[in-house]
Image (cartoon, rainbow, N blue to C red):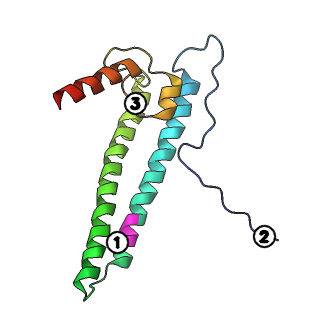
Amino acid sequence: MTDSPKPITSPFSFKPYVETEGEEYMNESQLKHFDTILNNWKSELMKEVDRTVHHMQDDAANFPDPNDRATQESEFSLELRTRDRERKLIKKIDDSLKEIESGDYGFCESCGIDIGIRRLEARPTASLCIDCKTLDEIREKQMG
C-alpha cells in the first residue's frame, strides 16, 4: 500500500462563493465565507513565522569561513524581509476581520460601492473597488 502525497493546502483553497439571485450583498453567509478565508490565511502566515523562528534558531551557526557566514546572513536577511512583508499583511488581515465585525467589509473605502465577491476572493484584504484602485495606481505612477 502506497501513501498518496499530501495535497498542497493554501489559504486560498476554498470553494468560490455561489451567489443566489436576489441575495443581499455582504449578508451573513458571505461574511462568514470571507471570515473563514481571512482566518485561514492568517493561520498559514503565523505558521510561517513559527517556522522561520525555529529555522533561524536551529540553523544559526558561527561559521569560521567568512563566505559561509555571509551566505547564512544573506539567507536570514531575505527570510526576515519576507516575514516583515507578511507581518504587514497580517495587519491588513486583522483590519479586514475588524471590518467584518463592524459591517464595513466589502465596501470601497473611497467611494462606498460594492468591491465585489470575486475581487474579494482574489484579494480578501482589498479595501478599494477596482475603479478606485485603478485611479489610485495612476496617481501613484504620475507622482513617481
Task: Point out residue 143 in the picture as x, y percentages from the top left corner.
Answer: 17, 28
Q: Amino acid at mark 2?
A: Thr
| Region of the chain picked out in magenta, as a range | 52-56
In the picture provided, is 29 more to the left or to the right than 135?
A: right
**Position above or below: 23 against 140:** above
Give the alpha-carbon distance from disc 2 to disc 1, as whole Å.
34 Å
Q: Amino acid at mark 3?
A: Ala
Q: Quadrant of the C terminus?
A: top left
In the picture provided, is 79 more to the left or to the right than 105?
A: left
Residue labelled with disc 2: 2
Residue labelled with disc 1: 56
Give the alpha-carbon distance from disc 1 to disc 3, as whole Å.
32 Å
Residue labelled with disc 3: 126
Residue 109 seen anywhere in this rendered image of the structure = no
Quick one: label 2 or label 3, which is nearer the N terminus? 2
Principal secondary structure, stretch drawn in magenta:
helix
In the picture provided, is 42 more to the left or to the right than 128?
A: right
Q: Quick check: is 55 in the magenta stretch?
A: yes
**Position above or below: 88 against 65:** above
**Position above or below: 127 against 69:** above
Q: Look at 45% across and 17% down and name the residue there.
A: 114
* Residue contact between numbered discs 2 and 1, judged by CB atoms under 8 Å: no
